[in-house]
Amino acid sequence: MDNQEIRNDFPMLIKHPHFIYFDNAATTQKPQSVIDALTNYYENDNFNVHRSVYSAAERTTQMFEACREKVAQFINAKDNKSIIFTAGTTQGINQVANGYYKYHLKKDDEIVVSIAEHHSNLLPWQNLAKQNGAKLKFIDINNNGTLNLNSAKKVITDNTKLVSITAVSNVLGTINNLAALIEIAHQHNADVLIDAAQAAPEIKIDVQKLNPEWLAFSGHKMLAPTGIGILYGKKELLAKMNPTQLGGEMIEHVDKNDFKAKDIPYRLEAGTPNVEGVIGLSKAIDYLENIGMNNIENICKNLGQYLYDQLSKTDGISVYGPKQRQTGIVSFNIDKIHPHDAATYLDFNHIAVRAGQHCAEPLTNKLGVNATLRASMYFYNNKHECDKLVQKIIEMRSFFNGA
C-alpha cells in the first residue's frame, strides 16, 4: 500500500486534504473500517454481552470475546484470560496500583519510575507511596534523552517491589531498553509494569519475550475508539488483584451479606463494558496487522528521522532527544517564540501540533524548558507534510521577528 492508498482509508484525511495532523501521540484518526464496525454494531449488534440467552446477544458476546483472543495474539500473551478490558492506559495503571499494590506494599518498600513518565504512570504511584509509606524513586535519563541504565542499576534495589516504566517517551519519542531494564528489575525480584500507550500503535509487542508482570495501553492511539484499553497481567497476579469496582457481571453469587467474584478476567470487569469500543479495537488491530507492525514501525521511524533532520538544520530551532530517531515523535522549540504562540500560528496554517508539557512536567523541568512543541506522526503522514511544517516555521520566525 502506498501513502495515498492508506490515506484514502481515513475519512478525515480525505475530507480535509490540506489539513496536516501531527498530534497522533494524543489520538489517531480512524479508518473507514473501524467507523463501519461501530455503525454496524449500533445498527445490527447492539446487545449486552454475557447476560442474555437469545441468539443475537450471543453473537455479540462471541464478537466481544473474539477481540480478547485477538488482543492476546497481538501482544503474544499465552492466555486470553490475561487480557482485561479497561477504559484506557490510565485506568489500567490505576487498577494495578489500587487493586494490587495497595495491598502488597508496606512502609519503606520502593516503587521505581523514570523521570520521563507520563503523569498517568506517575501520579498513581505518588499517591500510593503516600498512602502506604513506600518510597518513590526515579531513574534518570542521559543527555540525549535515552534511559540511563547505570542510574537504573543504582536506583533499583532488593527493596524495590515495582518498576513502572514507559516503553516509548511521549515527549522524546525514545524507545526504552525494556529487556535490559526488566532483567535488572527481576534480578532484585521486582515486578515490572510497562506503559505501552505510545508503543502499541507503532511497535510489535511480545510479552512472552519481554516477560513483564503488567502492560497497559489505549485503543484510541492505535486507530480504535476512545474509552477502550487493555491491561495485561500475569494470571497469578491478576488472580490476587482486588476488583476496584464492584457490581454486575463480575460476580458468581451474591447473598444478603457477601458475594463471590467470578474468575479472571470477568471479576475485574464490573458493569456493562464498552462493547462498541471492543469491536472497534478488533477492527483496528485487523487494520494494523494488514499493514504490518514492522512496516508501521519503519514508516514512523523514517518520518521521525526526516523531520528531526529538517528541523535540526533550520536556524533557531532546538530539537530534543537523540539524533537517531526511533519513532514518529519529535519535540522541539523555536527561539524567542512561545510554544503556544507557535502552535496557534501553525493552526492558522492548518497544521495541528501539540504545545505544552505533554503530561510529563518532571521531564519538561529536566529539559530546562517551560513547554515544547510536539509533532507526532503516524503511518498515514508523509515527508511532504514534514516539509510544509518546516516551511511554515521559517515563515513564522520572520513574522514574529518582524522581518
Image (cartoon, rainbow, N blue to C red):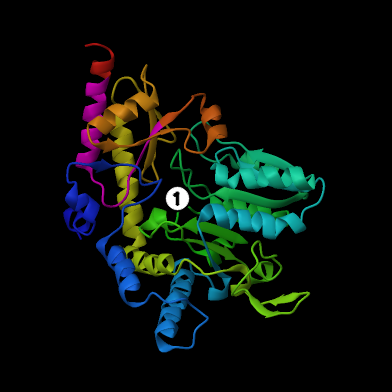
The N terminus sits in image quarter = bottom left
Is residue 1 visible in the rendered image? The answer is yes
- On the image, the x and y values in percent for residue 72 come to 49, 71
Residue 373 position (above or below residue 239)? above
How many marks the image carries: the answer is 1
Q: Residue at 30% x, 44% y: name it.
A: 303
Q: Residue at 31% x, 64% y: name it.
A: 34
Residue 243 position (above or below residue 131)? below
Q: In this figure, which residue is indicated by the disc labeled 1?
A: 198
Q: Is residue 386 magenta?
A: yes
- On the image, the x and y values in percent for residue 90 come to 55, 52
Residue 184 position (above or below residue 99)? above
Q: Residues within 10 Å of mark 1 (few under 14, many from 20)?
A: many
- On the image, the x and y values in percent for residue 195 come to 54, 52
The C terminus sits in image quarter = top left
Is residue 262 visible in the rendered image? The answer is no
Secondary structure found at label 1: loop
- On the image, the x and y values in percent for residue 328 come to 36, 45
Indicate left or right for 75 with 150 as reference.
Answer: left
Q: Residue at 32% x, 45% y: name it.
A: 377
Residue 2 position (above or below residue 112)? below
**Residue situated in front as seen by the camera: 221 or 45:** 45
Indicate left or right for 51 with 378 as reference.
Answer: right
Q: In terms of image quadrants, where is residue 203?
A: bottom left
Q: Residue at 73% x, 55% y: name it.
A: 102
Which residue type does callout 1 highlight? Answer: Gln
Q: Is residue 294 magenta?
A: no
What is the magenta range?
373-396
Q: In terms of image quadrants, where is residue 321?
A: top left
